[in-house]
Amino acid sequence: MINRNSFKNSALTLMLSSFVLLSANAVEATTSVTRTLVTEPSQGLTSIYDLINSAKKTIDMTMYELTDTTAENLLVQAASNGVTVRVILDQDNEKSNNQAAYTLLAAHGVQVHWANTAYTYTHKKTITVDGTTAAIMTLNLSSQYYSTSRDFAVIENDANDIKAIEAVFNADFANKAITPALGDDLVWSPTNSQSVLLALINGAKYNLKVENEEMDDTAIAAALASAAKRGVQVEVTMTANSDYATELNQLKTAGVKIATYAATAPLYIHAKVIIADFGYTAAKAYMGSENFSNTSLNKNRELGLTLTDSDILSSLNATLTSDFKGGTAY
């Protein structure tokens, strides 16, 4: 004879176990990390504007230069809708360019803060919405450059990264010192950027593709030269700048292949990207606000991240390959 109570208990246990499993899977599904690459100038700013528009509770933005009136008006509209909007703007180098945005935002309910002068520049370009999603960018919100500037952004929802970004924002907004948490893959200046970039370059075994606006950091230049000397295929693409002639000559002598664009060319290389060992299992990339200078790596407030997402790496590689081919051999 079947014990009905035992049967009911077993059935109930099975139901509860299934519910717990389904709930766990649902939580995992809703919290899975997603990252989306935005490539400029081809993709435009729609995804960035959409991110701002999506805010329901909070927007925290740190921007080196803000002159994009569309972005400014979206921030104003968000504040009028009851969203708490906080913005940090650089004042060490860009105060005159940022003043109009500061005045407009402050007059319309946005909490605006001039960046902490403890940093040489606040060169970070980050937007965090509702404490759940962030855009980490190489570009400033300056519309006069959108049509010609090679730039990238990654929009992500990595909870560990977001928590660290928000903690630093809160400290910077209050002019308080902080040692940033690294999240899962964050690259901070002045905390770990130089060591992360050097490790990425020094660890490359097969190939390196690089885009940067500057080539002024002696350690980075030496690491790229050393990589070429040990047989790594190194490609560097930049907008031509005579300020970096010494470093570029050093790289060329070491076997680095260099392509440059004239300052008057339709494409300006403003991006800050390193791709290491693309096509191999250990492929990895860096993208962020950090330029290759001692100031940017060790004295500014900056933010980037390392990436292993295969689709993002493929897209970055395709763009850098095309840019290199489109430049003039140095």
Image (cartoon, rainbow, N blue to C red):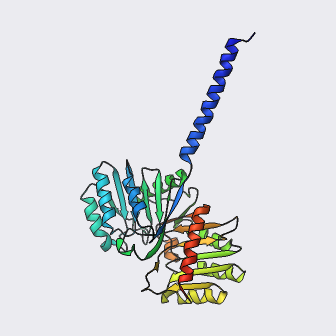
Residue lying farthest to the right in this orientation: 1
Residue lying farthest to the left in this orientation: 107
In this orientation, which residue lies closer to the viewer: 295 or 234? 234
Specify whether residue 194 is in view.
no
In this orientation, which residue lies closer to the viewer: 95 or 34? 34
Q: Is residue 298 left or right of residue 310?
A: left
Question: Which image quarter is the N terminus in?
Answer: top right
Residue lying farthest to the top in this orientation: 1
Residue at x 32%, y 58% (from the top left corner): 74
Residue at x 57%, y 64% (from the top left corner): 312
Residue at x 64%, y 80% (from the top left corner): 234
Count of numbered labels shown in the rendering? 0
Q: Position of residue 21 (x, y in %)?
A: 63, 35
In the displayed structure, would residue 162 be above or below residue 205?
above
Q: Quadrant of residue 10?
A: top right
Q: Position of residue 17 (x, y in %)?
A: 64, 29
Residue at x 55%, y 77% (from the top left corner): 322
Q: Position of residue 169 (x, y in %)?
A: 43, 57
In the displayed structure, would residue 250 be above or below residue 141?
below
Q: Position of residue 221 (x, y in %)?
A: 60, 81
Specify whether residue 327 is in view.
yes
In this orientation, which residue lies closer to the viewer: 323 or 231? 323
Q: Quadrant of residue 325?
A: bottom right
Question: Which image quarter is the C terminus in?
Answer: bottom right
